[in-house]
Amino acid sequence: MADKPKQQNKQEPQQSVFLKAMITGFFGGILWSGVGAVAYYFNFTELTAASFMFRSFLQTEWTGTWLAEILAILLVGLLSLLIAILYYILLKNKNGIWPGLFFGLSLWGIIFFVLRPIFPAIPSFLELNSDTWVTSGCLFILYGVFIGYSISYEYREFNDAANSYSKEGGV
């Protein structure tokens, strides 16, 4: 009879939860800014990641190309690492979709109202059409829920595993 592998109760280190939050942030930024590029292509919005990242600071022809859009999406992924860290620090122990939803709406408000002077190529909020308002708002909500729910889930799973491990006689 073959030996059955012994099950070991291994606790996942806290570092890996933070690392998973960073990975979630990076891919969340890429995913939702990519969806934003698709929404721009189908005329649901007047703005793309390249609008914010490049066209506000560079007045060259290449900023209107697909290469600029891909580079901007990657840059949003990198900036999203900072946003994931912020969520991890402030809201990791909040459960449900509501914290992520409000986090996403807050980001939307900060970018469109507070940071708007930094991006001169972006029209003011009232100059944008309602499709852009709704689409960008929804994308930020989805991004916030994606980041928030994923980070909170990983944090909760880690704590549940740590609690059950300590109850079973672990260190």
Image (spheres, rainbow, N blue to C red):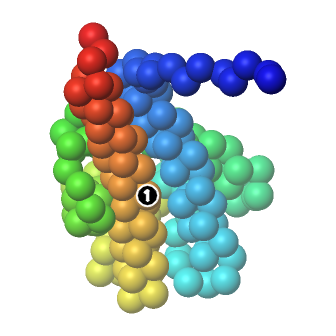
Where is residue 135? Give x, y as percent. Answer: 45, 79
Task: Relative to 50, say whether 21 is above or below.
Answer: above
Left/right of residue 152 with respect to residue 63 in the rendered view = left
- Residue, disc 1: 146
Residue 19 at least partly seen: yes
Left/right of residue 122 with respect to residue 171 in the rendered view = right
The three-letter code of the residue at mark 1 reads Phe
Left/right of residue 19 with respect to residue 109 in the rendered view = right
Residue at x 53% of width, y 36% of height: 23
Where is residue 29? Give x, y as percent. Answer: 52, 50
Residue 109 at least partly seen: no
Task: Relative to 96, say whether 22 is above or below.
Answer: above
Within 10 angstroms of label 1, few (less than 14), some, or many (20 or more) residues?
Answer: many
Q: Which quarter of the rendered picture does the C terminus lie within? A: top left
Instruction: Say which element carries label 1.
Output: helix
129 and 99: which one is in front?
Answer: 99
To which quarter of the image does residue 124 belong?
Answer: bottom left
Residue at x 36% of width, y 55% of height: 149
20 and 117: which one is in front?
Answer: 20
Q: Residue furthest bottom?
A: 130
Task: Relative to 31, say whether 7 is above or below.
Answer: above
Q: Residue furthest top?
A: 171
Where is residue 26? Give x, y as percent. Answer: 53, 41
Residue at x 54% of width, y 60% of height: 32
86 and 121: which one is in front?
Answer: 86
To which quarter of the image does residue 164 belong?
Answer: top left
Q: Which quarter of the rendered picture does the N terminus lie within? A: top right
Where is residue 34? Give x, y as percent. Answer: 63, 60
Q: Residue furthest right?
A: 1
